[in-house]
Amino acid sequence: GWVGEKKKVTQQQSPQTRTRKKSPMHLSRVSGALPITRVVGVARGALCGRRDGPDGWPSASGWSRSPSRASTGERRGCSANAAAASGDGQSIGGASNTGENRFAGAARDGGQPPRICVVGGGFGGLYTAIKLEQLMWPKGSKPRVTLVDQNTRFSFKPLLYDVLTDSATEDEVAPAYSTVLAPYSVRYVQGTVTGVINDDDAEKAVLLQDGGRVPYDWLVMAVGARTNSFGVPGVEEYALQFSTYDDAVRLKEELAKFNADEKNRNRGAEVCIVGGGYAGVELAASLVDRLGGKCKVRLVTSGEDIMEQAPEGQREAAREVLVADGVSVLCGRLVEEISVAGGASGDGKGPGKRIVQTTDKVSQSRKEMVEADIVIWTAGQSPALTGEHRNRMPFKVNENGAMETDRTLKVVNTRDVFALGDVAIGSQQTLPSTAQVALQQADFVAWNIWASINNRPLLNFQYQHLGNMMSLGASKGAVALPIPVPPPVSAALKASPFGDILKAAGVSVNTTFGGASDGITIQGPAGALLRRAAYLYRQPTDGQRLSVVSSWGSLLQERVKRGDFK
């Protein structure tokens, strides 16, 4: 996509002037807020008495904004986070310091351009690399960007559930990096990172398992998260994971293998899902959607309810679907061990009943055993820098495997290393482990590297929540929009005839969470359509979007031929 205005950026421009003239970080739609968030932002501004800028659109995450415009005090919004996070006297996201212009002059004189290495090709890493390519660089200072990842494909994780329901293709969910990066000059290197050299007295480099090395002047750590078993015996041996495209394909293969076995002709698969958050609930709904009445799904969660951190409207929508699908939910249960009936054989991944031993979370005494043909672990993830990976990093990594960053997303005690996504932890606020966070952080990391190289002020990151989306099957979804509706207004809507019309359309207004509005929830087919449109928009390139639309047409034809809509 086209990025920025083709105006020369001069050293004499102040940050304020640069903001008015749309800085090089005038981002394209590749990473901006969803179109619906324009409506969300305007509604929030109106209800909170906020006036937006001259164009009338909110500054949610840079739809047509540079981070400088999106996060300065002039458009701080009405969230409580804004006031709390500005206690240091600076406006949220305002300039915090100035980067060192170590390379621009040398490059203009014919020297080597700065080298940027991005480790990790998830949402944070991939979109940072793309944004760095899209910025308007002063002549001679454009860097050489290298993306390092151990996989050959990018995983669009929110769409993994659509793989199970056959409503998304491989090209949509897991496009090859070579395809995604084809429009750009980003160099892709497949490899497993074993260490980093970050010594000013030596050439800085990322070390690879095959003995290779990627030299850098600026480093971005975006290695993501890994499945956390929390030390429960048997998880790694007898449970499937569900966090990558390969995991989704493997689950489909296990289900097909079970159904192909003659011994299972007269019964459906019994599946136990451990984890009652978004991942577990979406997975349960997708499995029932795929297998229909030929399966029995149980959901085990340690919480008192499913999706305890989700908006009430989404939680209610999920409950309705799980009840209608016949999913059994066991709340307040801790998993002590996962084993195989009759003892383990082979690698534990083949046929044989799994035994999930649970205990009551409160009393720690009342035990219950759950039998299943397939166990799927979705109980949580943790930053990937753990164990030996943590020890090989020259940066401070906490016990959970995350690197501490300052408000500009620069790793503390470093001059040229940034971190984002699951592997980064800031001192100002705790952020959810979602693609939404990584995408917003990618905007700021790319800008701050540009600013560091070109001797401009760095910007402080502030997360702005845009809502939650979830799949509840191939044709159902639930999208929660954080539009604050005063409780009296929402109560009046529910009591009026208009409330029945909204309910029939799959729209609900909630009045929970401390007396404030819980936002608006769009569920059912309308929620599914909005979710898929949003993820189409989130695809990294225009070419990828066209490919996805084409695949949608093919899938629709197949479903019509099968009679799915009769």
Image (tube, rainbow, N blue to C red):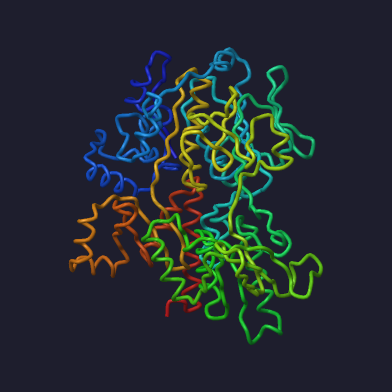
**In this view, 24 is above or below 47:** above
Q: How far from the left and from the top, in percent, is residue 430?
A: 48, 41
Residue at horizontal 39%, vertical 13%?
12
The quadrant in which residue 17 appears is top left
Q: Nearer the viewer, residue 205 or 237?
A: 237
Which one is in front, 85 or 501? 85
Between 246 and 369, the one nearer to me in the picture: 369
Residue 35 locus on image (x, y percent): 35, 48
Q: Could you tell me residue 212's position as x and y percent?
A: 76, 34
The spot of residue 198 in percent (x, y) is 68, 25
Look at the picture and state if 455 lies above or below 254: above
Quarter of the image containing the N terminus? top left
Q: Is residue 90 left or right of residue 127?
A: left
Based on the displayed image, in which of its 4 quarters is residue 106 positioned? top right
- Height in image: 329 above or below 205? below
Q: What residue occupies the far bottom of the structure in this picture?
A: 266
